[in-house]
């Protein structure tokens, strides 16, 4: 869809520069120490055990001896049937799914790196994330962010792939990295590999369904697999009904499949979402061309005339030429 000054085309894909960074590990254990000491009833006649504000040792009764509370958080066994004590020490994070426990001391550096990227200071952001990757060579979050910095902000998808591959070697289930690898593969024209990654994400039920269906459809079109592409555009429309850009893309592939009436309907649905200065003359031109092919000269003429009326500063000159040529052709029919 044509973008023009003051009127940006609505695109369903959230900016690729805004991403969720997956959390590795868990946050500190939230148990709070009681505001005041509590008296614990003794069992039988053995007296009273006191639990201090900072849980340490719980006095056991009689000959039970002394139960020491581990520094690792867990429930302390009951004394008889009355007492349960909890320890509030922070749990140790363990490695899982190929990921190491997150070093919290680098969190602020990661935030600084992201601020640098977003403020346009790409070189400084890249230097910082490279340094972190050298220091923590097995931290998948850091390695993935290095790949994204190169691939998205730096426009270097080939170099980004090296880091995505390393992440997936360490953590094959890191789906966010698999998505970015698929996007980089598509940018490099390696569409069959990109489709394979998109397929794997769909199979796993990855949450960004709209992005996956949309980008897989583009790769499928590049491979000449229009029927599958039409399926994905339909799934994308289901994720964001009424989105004019998605409807336009599905109309294009439907036209190539010979489904002209369906394509006209998609373009009409897209135009129904726009009014006034928001009307996109490219949609009107496309519908006019399809109506011409269907033998609807009057409908085509109306579309080309409306497209010329809707043409605004900032629209491409070639579109203006196409609208004028379409109108002239419809007048001869």
Image (cartoon, helix red, strand yellow):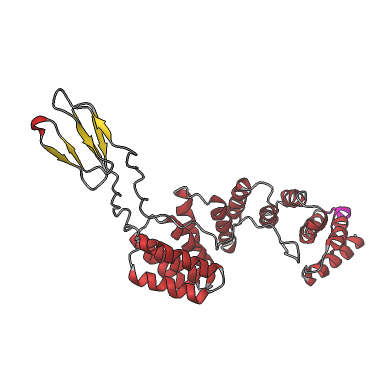
* Residue 19 on image: x %, y %: 51, 58
Q: Quadrant of the N terminus?
A: bottom right
Q: Residue at x 44, y 75 (%)?
A: 127
> Horizontally, is 196 left or right of 333 in the view?
left
**For the magenta stretch, what is the residue range?**
295-299
As drawn, the residue found furthest toward the top would be 44
* Residue 35 on image: x %, y %: 34, 39
> Horizontally, is 61 left or right of 211 in the view?
left
Is 278 one of the magenta-colored residues? no
Q: Residue at x 22, y 27 (%)?
A: 41
* Residue 57 on image: x %, y %: 19, 41
Q: Is residue 123 above or below residue 304?
A: below
**Who is closer to the viewer here, 145 or 295?**
145
Q: Main secondary structure of the magenta part?
A: helix
| Residue 163 image-quadrant placement | bottom left
Q: Is residue 246 above or below residue 193?
A: above
Image label count: 0
**Who is closer to the viewer here, 170 or 319?**
170
As drawn, the residue found furthest toward the right would be 331
Q: Is residue 196 above or below residue 75?
A: below
> Horizontally, is 18 left or right of 40 in the view?
right
| Residue 73 image-quadrant placement | top left
Q: Quadrant of the C terminus?
A: bottom right
> Horizontally, is 98 left or right of 322 in the view?
left
> Is residue 268 visible in the rendered structure shown here?
yes
> Is residue 189 visible in the rendered structure shown here?
no
* Residue 76 on image: x %, y %: 22, 37
């Amino acid at each position: 869809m044509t973008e023009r000054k003051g009127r940006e085309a609505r695109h369903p894909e959230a900016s690729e520069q805004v991403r969720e960074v997956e959390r590795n590990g868990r946050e500190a254990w939230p148990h709070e120490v009681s505001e005041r000491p509590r008296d614990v009833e003794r069992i039988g006649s053995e007296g009273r055990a006191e639990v201090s504000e900072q849980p340490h040792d719980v006095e056991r009764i009689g000959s039970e001896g002394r139960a020491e509370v581990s520094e690792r958080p867990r429930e302390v066994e009951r004394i008889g049937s009355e007492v349960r004590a909890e320890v509030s020490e922070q749990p140790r994070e363990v490695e899982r799914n190929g990921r190491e426990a997150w070093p919290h001391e680098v969190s602020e550096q990661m935030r600084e790196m992201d601020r640098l990227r977003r403020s346009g200071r790409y070189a400084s952001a890249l230097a910082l994330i490279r340094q972190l990757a050298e220091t923590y060579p097995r931290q998948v979050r850091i390695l993935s962010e290095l790949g994204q910095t190169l691939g998205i902000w730096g426009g270097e998808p080939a170099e980004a792939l090296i880091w995505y591959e390393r992440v997936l070697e360490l953590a094959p289930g890191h789906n966010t990295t698999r998505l970015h690898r698929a996007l980089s593969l598509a940018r490099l024209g390696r569409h069959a590999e990109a489709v394979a990654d998109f397929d794997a994400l769909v199979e796993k039920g990855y949450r960004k369904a709209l992005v996956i269906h949309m980008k897989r459809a583009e790769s499928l079109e590049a491979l000449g697999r229009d029927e599958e592409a039409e399926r994905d555009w339909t799934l994308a429309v289901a994720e964001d009904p009424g989105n004019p850009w998605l409807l336009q893309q599905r109309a294009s592939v439907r036209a190539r499949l010979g489904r002209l009436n369906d394509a006209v309907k998609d373009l009409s649905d897209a135009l129904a979402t726009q009014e006034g200065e928001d009307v996109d003359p490219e949609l009107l031109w496309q519908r006019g061309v399809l109506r011409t092919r269907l033998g609807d000269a009057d409908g085509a003429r109306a579309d080309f005339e409306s497209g010329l009326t809707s043409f605004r500063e900032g629209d491409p000159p070639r579109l203006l030429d196409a609208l004028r040529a379409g109108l002239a052709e419809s007048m001869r029919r």
